[in-house]
């Protein structure tokens, strides 16, 4: 059985916590950032949990980390 390759786009976009949960960034965080209020740009700083529906699909793209 050959090794599974990690999808490099998924590796760059998702982060796996120590307990195995998938984290993601919010979208539109860097697009036209100068025009957005500081209050809005602060909301883009943190990471969010990936929805449980998507975890199974995304764990195939990052096989050895998840």
Image (tube, grey):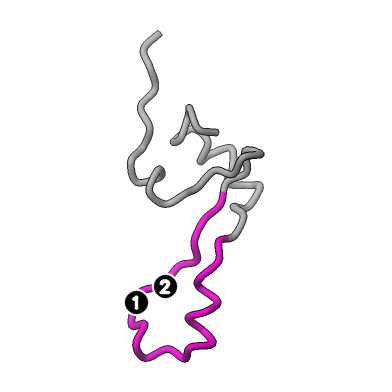
Give the image quarter of residue 27: bottom left
Say if the magenta span includes residue 36.
yes
Q: Position of residue 49 (x, y in %)?
A: 62, 55
Q: Which residue is mark 2?
A: 28
Left or right? Give the position of 35 relative to 64: left
- The residue under the point 38% across, 17% down is 3
Q: Which residue is mark 1?
A: 31
Q: Quadrant of the C terminus?
A: top right
Residue 59, compared with residue 38, is above or below; it is: above
Residue 52, compared with residue 29, is above or below; it is: above
Q: Nearer the viewer, residue 28 or 21?
A: 21
Say if the magenta span includes residue 46.
yes
Q: Position of residue 52 (x, y in %)?
A: 66, 47
Give the image quarter of residue 2: top left
Left or right? Give the position of 52 relative to 27: right
Q: Position of residue 21 (x, y in %)?
A: 62, 43
The local crowd at label 1, few if under 14, some if 14 to 19, many if 20 or more residues have their Cα within 10 Å, is few
Q: Position of residue 22 (x, y in %)?
A: 57, 46
- The residue under the point 39% across, 22% down is 4
Q: Secondary structure beneath disc 2?
A: loop
- The residue under the point 37% across, 91% down is 35
- The residue under the point 35% across, 27% down is 5
Left or right? Give the position of 23 relative to 29: right
The local crowd at label 2, few if under 14, some if 14 to 19, many if 20 or more residues have their Cα within 10 Å, is few
Specify start and end residues of the magenta stretch as a single range: 23-47
Q: Secondary structure beneath disc 1?
A: loop
User: Extreme front residue here?
Assistant: 18
Residues at badges 1 and 2 in contact (C-beta under 8 Å)? Answer: yes
Q: Quadrant of the N terminus?
A: top left
């Amino acid at each position: 059985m050959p090794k599974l390759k990690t999808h490099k786009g998924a590796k760059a976009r998702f982060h796996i916590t120590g307990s195995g949960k998938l984290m993601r960034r919010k979208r539109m965080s860097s697009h036209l950032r100068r025009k957005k209020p500081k209050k809005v740009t602060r909301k883009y700083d943190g990471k969010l949990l990936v929805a449980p529906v998507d975890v199974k699909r995304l764990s195939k793209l990052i096989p050895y980390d998840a």
